[in-house]
Amino acid sequence: MSFLKKWKEKFTSKEQQEEVSDKYKEGLTKTRKSFSEKINDLVARYRKVDEEFFEDLEEILIAADVGVTTVMDLIEELEMEVKRRNIKDTSEVKGVISEKLVDIYQGEGDSEDDTSLNIQQDELTVILFVGVNGVGKTTTIGKLAHQLKEEGKEVLLTAGDTFRAGAIEQLSEWGNRVGVDVIKHSEGSDPAAVIYDGIRAAKSRGVDVLLCDTAGRLQNKVNLMNELSKVKRVIEREIPNAPHEVLLVLDATTGQNALSQAKTFAEATDVSGIVLTKLDGTAKGGIVLAIRNELGTPVKLVGLGEKMTDLETFDPHAFVYGLFADLLEEEE
């Protein structure tokens, strides 16, 4: 079955498909324009699918920050599929590329379900956010709080980043905008103590979801990863099996640097999912595939714009559609 058919079968209505399509198309405009133009140019230059065609395609994918390891895997899969289907015309390769990108993201079997957040039923859910300063952690927390509140959940925020100047005020401002309370201490306080108070408050108020901010850099000699481990231990002590999610926030515009950050945090904390922010601001959106393929950690949320509603649950089909929309619609 072609990628387009699979994509359309995911939806119960054409309106729902168009809504998701438009969000990803708009959010990935920079990456898609760069991608589509280069692939269209590649197809125009080559009449047949040969070794040189694949070498040039390899360069295009690496330039989009898909990652060298992922690109090698993808090219190998493409070559095998082209031989299997006996494809000679370069224009026919477009659809195969999109199919294989989804396959590479999902790995063996269908792992789409692991992009949903691990929200507990009828008990407190604790979500811990980690990541370096400047990646959009606080903004992501605010957007997710808005999303959860719209779903009818009681949400509480905890200002665990007590080291960055202005971090507590920034989270408080988001709390005011969204209409949720923020548990906070003074600047320089012990982050684990703030998180502890957040948990106690959430329990006593019957809150559904507690969203915890953390520091991205410390101003003293305490190792950041040790501090995060301490926070995690406090949460585990108060609530068995918590935190239910440890979300690493990465800035898509930093490309391969985001991948190295992901590796560092994954070694130190049990990261359960990635939030990739600012996808709308980069032409290198292929980093999503590199992160998934090289780390094995699912991308759970993506930032596709600056509005409060521009935080989306990651969908690999929608993502690939956003990358290839022009080519796929032209093919159809």
Image (spheres, rainbow, N blue to C red):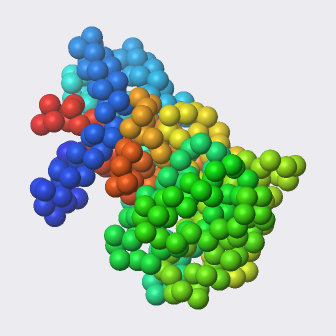
Q: Quadrant of residue 312?
A: bottom left
Count the numbered circles shown. 0
Position above or below: 196 against 8: below
Q: Is residue 12 left or right of residue 215?
A: left
Q: Quadrant of residue 17?
A: bottom left
Residue drawn at the location 37% of the way across and 44% of the way down: 305
Quarter of the C terminus within the rendering: top left
Position above or below: 296 against 229: above
Q: Nearer the viewer, residue 181 or 332?
A: 181
Q: Is residue 175 left or right of residue 204?
A: left
Q: Is residue 99 visible?
A: no
Residue drawn at the location 42% of the way across and 64% of the way down: 178
Q: Is residue 279 visible?
A: yes
**Residue 90 in picture, x, y percent from top left:** 24, 22
Residue drawn at the location 75% of the way across and 68% of the way down: 192
- The outermost residue toward the top is 45
**Residue 211 in picture, x, y percent from top left:** 55, 67
**Residue 324 in picture, x, y percent from top left:** 27, 35
Residue drawn at the location 49% of the way across and 54% of the way down: 140
Q: Nearer the viewer, residue 206 or 44?
A: 206
